[in-house]
Image (cartoon, coloured by chain):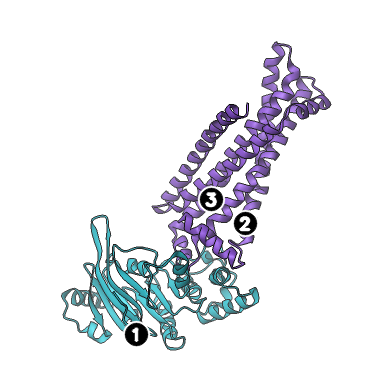
Amino acid sequence: MKPADENLVDVRGVKLKFADKVVLDGIDFGVKSQEVLVIMGLSGCGKSTLLSIMLGLLKPGAGTVFFKKEDMLKLSRSALNEARGHIGMVYQSAALVSSMVVGDNVALPLRELTDKDEKEIASIVDQKLELVGLKDARNKLPSELSGGMQKRAGLARALALDPELVLFDEPSAGLDPINSGVIDDLIIQLRDKHRVASVVVTHEMDSAFAVASRMAFIHAGKMIFEGKPEDFRNSKEPAIAEFLSSYEKQKQNRK
Amino acid sequence: MGRETVSEIAERLAKGRSPFRLEDFFYQCNRVGVGSVPMVVLLSVFVGLTMALLTGYQLRIFGIVTLVPAVVSVSFTREMGPLFTGIVLASRIGAAYTAELGAMTAGGEVNAIEGMGIGALRFLVTPRILAIFCLTVCLTVISVISGILGAAFISNLTLQIGYGYFFDQVMTNLLVKDIMAAVVKSFLFGGIIGWIACYKGLSVKGGAVGVGNATTSSVVVAVSSVIACDSFCNIFIVTFFP
């Protein structure tokens, strides 16, 4: 299977089973440069698993994942590590190294994967922390930060090597509307100013519509929708219609 | 994964890069080595003291109490020193390694490191295993010296064996093969403890309970393995280097 020419990432026919449970059953999608693809679906439908597969952390039972026309699943370990250097990942739990201060967390990929000197690294760390509004938190341990700050620190770390693609796993989950808005603005800023493509996995509809260039929906292991946000909103697909109406109901109840 | 980590290290060396962060290695060395000295010294002094006391008590019956320095120094060098150092390190450092790596695994930190393209085994495990591998032998030397000093002290106090005679007997009776046995055992024990502790830490499943279970299991398996390995080493040494 060959990747489409214009796509930065091409996921084709990805299947994954955990024991007897089929999690992903032939997922196909592509991500172009400088676009934000939002993947939605019910909890446990395999959205985060899909990100792990894209990063080569999990091997699917079948299918291919092309990143810059290289099949991530067939790369040697050193080539895979090299490819991972071009992909940033922001985890749901931030996954910062808890024994390192924020500055060292952001500097970690720079120290480990580049030959830059400490002066250069310090200036990149400052720049990335400034981008996410955390310059003052440089010497704080992750445990001293709020959930939103941890996510922003995770984003700064993901951006340290100037990746071409950033994967976001539930970036707004558990955040208040203000922090959630900050993360959304950062995703948009990455796309518009830094020309970075993003894949965002989320449940948060407001965030999803705010950042998405395209949207996709996974249901029963299959990608049942892939298209523009407005088409998603008007989709007649029963699973999507139910998802949207539940969300609207929840919103009404909150009022 | 192990083979890939070795090739990753080789690749970094070929590029003139350090295979792991040297500051991490020295931090682990300080923790394994310097941090364990008080416990190793304390334990060894008391074990040496008890050994000399009980050996002297038995040998006095046969009128050969003068053999205490030889018996204690040889048995401490070949057996007690490496074994007690191994047990101290398995419980003190092995448990710490497993708990640390286990918490990192459960918290998704190990996956995040791997996802950045930094080999988690190379970055997290190599400095730890190397530190314990290198430092166990140093701690064994400290343990043996402490044990012999404890034995000399109690021999002088209760068995009326002078320090001069005691140390003279130690030097006369200790052979190079005894010291080599201690050195070889120490390297083996260090490697075994480090490998088991890191493996258990990286295989954690099930959050905080999983970390607790892995830590307990790591100590039990490491202590048992050290004792079993010690027995096999003794059989090998006695058979091939009588």
Q: Could you tell me which residue is drawn at 78 percent across and 23 percent down?
A: B157
Q: Secondary structure at mark 3?
A: helix
Residue type, label 3: Tyr
Tell which subunit mark 3 falls on: B
Residue B172 placement (x, y as % from top left): 77, 27
State the image quarter where residue A44 is shown.
Answer: bottom left
- Answer few, some or many: residues within 10 Å of disc 1's Cα (few below 14, many 20 plus, some between 14 and 19): few
* Amino acid residing under circle 2: Phe
Work out whether residue B22 or residue A234 is closer to the camera in this orientation and state it.
B22
Q: Is residue B144 visible?
A: yes
Q: State the image quarter where residue A231 is shown.
A: bottom left
Check the rendered structure and report the hue given to chain B: purple
Do tags 3 and 2 sit on the same chain? Answer: yes
Q: Position of residue B118 (x, y in %)?
A: 50, 65
Q: Position of residue A221 (x, y in %)?
A: 23, 67
On the same chain, marks 3 and 1? The answer is no
**Residue B187 position by quadrant:** top right
Colour displayed for chain A in the image of the structure: cyan
Give the number of the disc on residue B97. 3
- Label for residue B211? none
Relative image position of residue B83 (x, y in whole percent): 60, 35
Q: Which mark lies nearer to you, 2 or 1?
A: 1
Marks 3 and 2 sit apart, C-alpha to C-alpha, by 13 Å
Q: Are marks 3 and 2 in contact (CB under 8 Å)?
A: no
Looking at this view, name the residue that lies furthest to the top: B62
* Residue located at (33% from left, 85% from top): A213
Q: Quadrant of the N terminus of chain B?
A: bottom left
The residue labelled by disc 1 is: A6
Give the chain letter at badge 2: B
Dot in front, 3 or 2 = 2
In the rendered image of this protein, does residue A101 appear above or below residue B131? Answer: below
